[in-house]
Amino acid sequence: MNGDDGGDGVLVRPIGCIRSPFTDPAGMPIQPAGAAGVRGLVEILPEFRDGLADLEGFSRIILIYLFHRSEGCSLRVVPFLDDREHGVFATRAPRRPNPIGLSVVRLVGVEGCRLVIEDVDVLDGTPLLDIKPYISAIDAFPDERCGWFNDFARDVRKVQADSRFAEPGP
Amino acid sequence: MNGDDGGDGVLVRPIGCIRSPFTDPAGMPIQPAGAAGVRGLVEILPEFRDGLADLEGFSRIILIYLFHRSEGCSLRVVPFLDDREHGVFATRAPRRPNPIGLSVVRLVGVEGCRLVIEDVDVLDGTPLLDIKPYISAIDAFPDERCGWFNDFARDVRKVQADSRFAEPGP
C-alpha cells in the first residue's frame, strides 16, 4: 500500500437506513432494473438532515451502503446471472473485501428526514453510508462494453437472488 | 438507527491505491468528464489479484475510494461549480460524513495487479476501497432531472478544483 494514508483503514458509520419490502435475501431482485416500481424509504438520522437540502431536484440518486447480511469475502464468485465464476471485482456480488454496495434508485420525494425511493433492490434494514446525486452528464454511459454481463443483460429484470451470499464463504 | 446491524460502523481497508498526475487538490478536474484522456493507474494489493479476473471485458469501471485529503465534514457546501450552498448529499463534494468518493473511469487495460485507466479525476495516492464493473443496462440513465447541476452541466469539463475541501471545515 503506497497511498498517502488510509492504509490502516477508516471506520465508516451509517448515516441512516434503507427500508424495503425485502426481508430475506432469497427471492430479491438482483439490481434496481429488476425492481422497477418497488418502493422503499431512506431514513436519515436527524443530525444529517441539513445535508439533504436541494436533493429533491434530482430524479435519481446513488445510494452507497453496507452489505450487512453478507458474510466473509470471496475473490471469485458465481454471480446470480451466470453459472461461471468471475473475479468479484467484475461482478456486483455482495461478498467483497469491503462489503460496500451501490444502487441507483429513483427519488420520488423528500419528507423531512425520509426519502421516498423506487426501484429498490436492497434488503430492509440496510445501513446507508452515503447519498450522491445521479448526474446524467457525469454518470450515464449508455454504450459501454460489458464483458460477461452482455450475455445476460436481458435477464437482469427477471432473475432473482438466492441466499448464496448470505451464508459464510469458503 | 434501526438497521439490523452495522449501526456502530464498519472498518473499511484499502484494496489498493489510485495513481494519477494530480498531487495537489487545487487545479484538479472536478469530475471524470473534465479529465477526458487523463491517464492513471490502479495498483491492487497482490492478495486481491484473483478478484480482477474477467474485469478486462468491461470498458468502464466504477472506483469507490476514500477522500483521504478531505478534512472534517460539512452538511452544507458550496460546490466547485456553483456559488450557492447546497446540502452535501446533493453534491459530489468530498467533505462528507463518510469520506467516500465514486468515479466512473475508462478501463484501458489490465496488467497483473495494475489497471491502466483514463478519465482520472482523483488525487495521486487515493486509497481504493472497491471496484465494480460499469454496466450500461444498470447504471446509465441519460435523461434524468439533475437539480441545481443542470445550470452548470456545460462547465463540468472546464472548471477546476481549488483547495476548499482540503482545509479543515468550519
Image: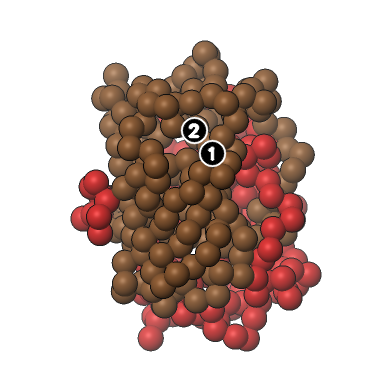
Chain colours: A red, B brown
For marks 1 and 2, the one nearer the N-term is 2
User: Is residue B140 shown left or right of residue A49?
Assistant: right
- Spot the residue most to the top: B83
Q: Vertical placement of B148 versus A106: above or below?
A: above
Label 2 sits on a secondary structure element that is loop
Residue name at image x 56 percent, y 69 percent: B56
Label 1 sits on a secondary structure element that is helix
**Can you identify the residue that label 2 sits on?**
B29
Q: Position of residue B73 (x, y in %)?
A: 33, 30
Q: Position of residue A56 (x, y in %)?
A: 63, 29
Residue name at image x 72 percent, y 46 percent: B141
* Real-space Cα separation, disc 1 to disc 2, in angstroms: 6 Å
User: Is residue A91 shown left or right of residue A152?
Assistant: left
Q: Quadrant of residue B94?
A: top left
Q: Position of residue A41 (x, y in %)?
A: 58, 45
Q: Nearer the viewer, residue B121 or B147?
A: B121
Residue name at image x 69 percent, y 58 percent: A144
